[in-house]
Amino acid sequence: MPSIKSASKKVFRWRYLLDKDFQLKYAFLLSGVALCVAALIGGNVYYSAKESYEILLKAGLGSQPEVLSLVKQWKTFLNSHLLILLSASVGFLTLIGIFISHKMVGPILVLKKNLRQISEGNYNVVMRLRKNDEFQDIKDHFNQIASALQKSTKEEIVALESLKTKITDLEAQHPLTSLIQKKKQMLGETF
C-alpha cells in the first residue's frame, strides 16, 4: 500500500510550472486581459492630459511657467511612472495566473496518474490532494469509485475462492488460482 504522508505536514513547492502549456495559456490570458485594461487606463489618462493641455493652449496659458511645469510633470508621469505601474501590473497578474493554475494542474496530474494505475490493473489507489488544491469534490468521487472497485474485486475473490473449493480436479483449479492471484494483485495484496 502506498505510504501516507502526514496531513499536517505542509509541502512547499518550488516548481510551479507543472504543465507549462496549460498554465502559461491561462497566465497569458490573464496578463492579456491586464494588458488591455492597462492600455485602456493609459489611453484615457493620455487622452485626458492631451485634452487638458489643448484647453490650456486655447486659453492662452500654454507659455506660462507654471503650465509648462505642469505639462512636464504630466509627461514624466505618463512616460515613466504610469508605464512602470501598468507593466508591473501585467507582470504581477501573469504570476498570479501561474499560481492559480498551479492549484488546478497539480490535481489534474494526480488524477491522470491514478487513472493510469487503475487502467493498468492496480485498484489499490487512493487520490490525495493538498488541502488548498482545487477539485476536492472530484477527488472524493474518484476515491468512492476506487473503493467500489476494490469492494467489487474483493467480492469476486471470495466468490472465486468459494468456487475453487468446490472443484476437486487440481488442473481445473489452476485457472481459478491464476485469476484469484491476478485479482489480489489488483488490490495490492501479496500472496
Image (cartoon, helix red, strand yellow):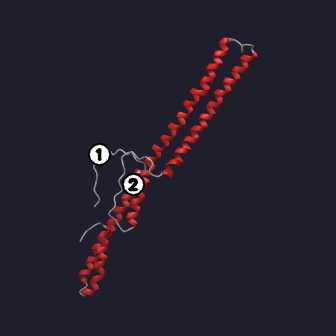
At numbered mark 1, what does the secondary structure look like: helix, strand or loop?
loop
Residue at 36 percent across and 62 percent down: it is: 146
Q: Position of residue 183 (x, y in %)?
A: 31, 72
Q: Is residue 67 above or below residue 110?
A: above
Specify few, some or many for label 1: CA neighbours under 10 Å numbering under 14, 14-19, or 20 or more: few
Residue at numbered disc 1: 9
Residue at 29 percent across and 73 percent down: it is: 157
At numbered mark 2, what does the secondary structure look like: helix, strand or loop?
helix
Q: Position of residue 112 (x, y in %)?
A: 42, 59
Q: Calculate the distance from the C-alpha at mark 2 to the C-alpha at mark 1.
A: 19 Å
Residue at numbered disc 2: 139
Question: Circles 2 and 1: CB distance less than 8 Å?
Answer: no
Q: Is residue 57 above or below residue 182?
A: above
In front here: 77 or 155? 77
* Amino acid beneath label 1: Lys
Quadrant of the snapshot with the C terminus? bottom left
The quadrant where residue 139 appears: bottom left
In the picture, measured across the screen, residue 69 lies left or right of residue 187, that is right
Q: Position of residue 159 (x, y in %)?
A: 29, 75
